[in-house]
Image (spheres, helix red, strand yellow):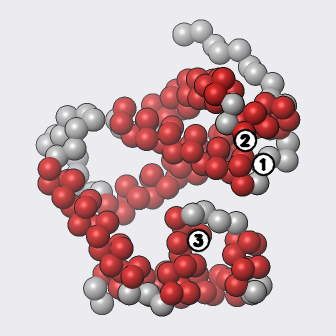
């Protein structure tokens, strides 16, 4: 396997990504796509998961660039790698919550294909999440949406709510606890 030549990133490259230059975006996805594929294939079970994780990494990197930028363009590769690590961590965490310990059976659907039952279960669970969120007070619903779905910066959320960072932790804990109660049907 041939090694990909190392690319040096600069402020101009980052700026071209921010404004959506097609050639730069293509270079970005090809360059990091190859590197991330190697990393993700060694850690995930299916080609579909590898592709999903790769696309999620790209989306988060581009969103962060457009919202906040990067402080050190030369460290852009490390930034992309850390975003990928976060995506992997979230996949592992989500999988550990939904996968039973005795799930080593060979009755999984073919790679890349989702069974109708699995699709229905995901749809029902998504519906339960929406229902649980809808039952929360507006402030808690907004807080969870901002932090977990929109991935807003916590300092920005604190400014918007006019609270300090330590109180934000209290509010998030309460909102998550209330969400869990609603989600589990308690």
When asked about the image quadrant of residue 165, the answer is bottom right
Q: Secondary structure at mark 2?
A: helix
Question: Residue 159, how many percent across, how many down?
Answer: 76, 79
Question: Residue 132, how many percent across, how many down?
Answer: 36, 80
Q: Tell me the mark number nearer the camera, choosing from 3 and 2.
A: 2
Image marks 1 and 2: residues in contact by CB distance under 8 Å: yes
Question: Residue 138, how many percent across, how many down?
Answer: 51, 87
Ranked by sequence position, the earlier of labels 3 and 2 is: 2
Real-space Cα separation, disc 1 to disc 3, in angstroms? 19 Å
The answer to whether residue 115 is above or below residue 135 is: above
Instruction: Determine which residue is flagged by label 3.
Output: 146
Crowd around label 2: few <14 · some 14–19 · many ≥20 (10 Å): some
Q: Secondary structure at mark 1?
A: loop
Real-space Cα separation, disc 3 to disc 2, in angstroms? 22 Å
Residue occupying image coordinates x 50% and y 81%: 141
Image marks 3 and 2: residues in contact by CB distance under 8 Å: no
**Number of the label disc, if any, that sits on residue 133:** none
**Going by the picture, which residue comes out furthest to the top?**
2
Instruction: Determine which residue is flagged by label 2.
Output: 18
**Would residue 52 be found to the left or right of residue 13 on screen?**
left
Which quadrant, please, contains the N terminus? top right
Nearest the viewer among 177 and 152 is: 152
Instruction: Determine which residue is flagged by label 1.
Output: 69
Crowd around label 1: few <14 · some 14–19 · many ≥20 (10 Å): some
Q: Secondary structure at mark 3?
A: helix
Q: How many marks?
A: 3
Residue occupying image coordinates x 30% and y 90%: 186
Residue occupying image coordinates x 36% and y 73%: 130
Nearest the viewer among 74 and 94 is: 74
**Would residue 184 be found to the left or right of residue 142 on screen?**
left
Real-space Cα separation, disc 1 to disc 2, in angstroms? 8 Å
Nearest the viewer among 104 and 98 is: 98
């Amino acid at each position: 396997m041939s090694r990909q030549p190392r690319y040096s990133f600069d402020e101009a490259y980052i700026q071209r990504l921010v404004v959506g230059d097609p050639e730069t975006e293509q270079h970005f996805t090809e360059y990091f796509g190859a590197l991330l594929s190697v990393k993700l294939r060694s850690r995930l079970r299916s080609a579909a998961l590898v592709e999903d994780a790769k696309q999620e990494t790209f989306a988060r990197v581009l969103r962060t660039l457009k919202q906040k930028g990067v402080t050190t363009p030369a460290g852009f590769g490390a930034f992309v790698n850390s975003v990928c690590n976060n995506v992997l961590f979230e996949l592992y965490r989500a999988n550990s919550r939904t996968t039973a310990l005795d799930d080593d059976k060979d009755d999984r659907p073919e790679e890349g294909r989702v069974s109708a039952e699995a699709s229905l279960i995901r749809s029902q669970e998504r519906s339960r999440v929406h229902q649980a969120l809808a039952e929360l007070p507006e402030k808690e619903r907004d807080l969870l949406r901002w932090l977990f779905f929109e991935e807003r910066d916590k300092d920005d959320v604190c400014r918007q709510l006019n609270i300090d960072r330590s109180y934000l932790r209290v509010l998030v804990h309460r909102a998550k606890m209330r969400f869990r109660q609603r989600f589990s049907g308690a």
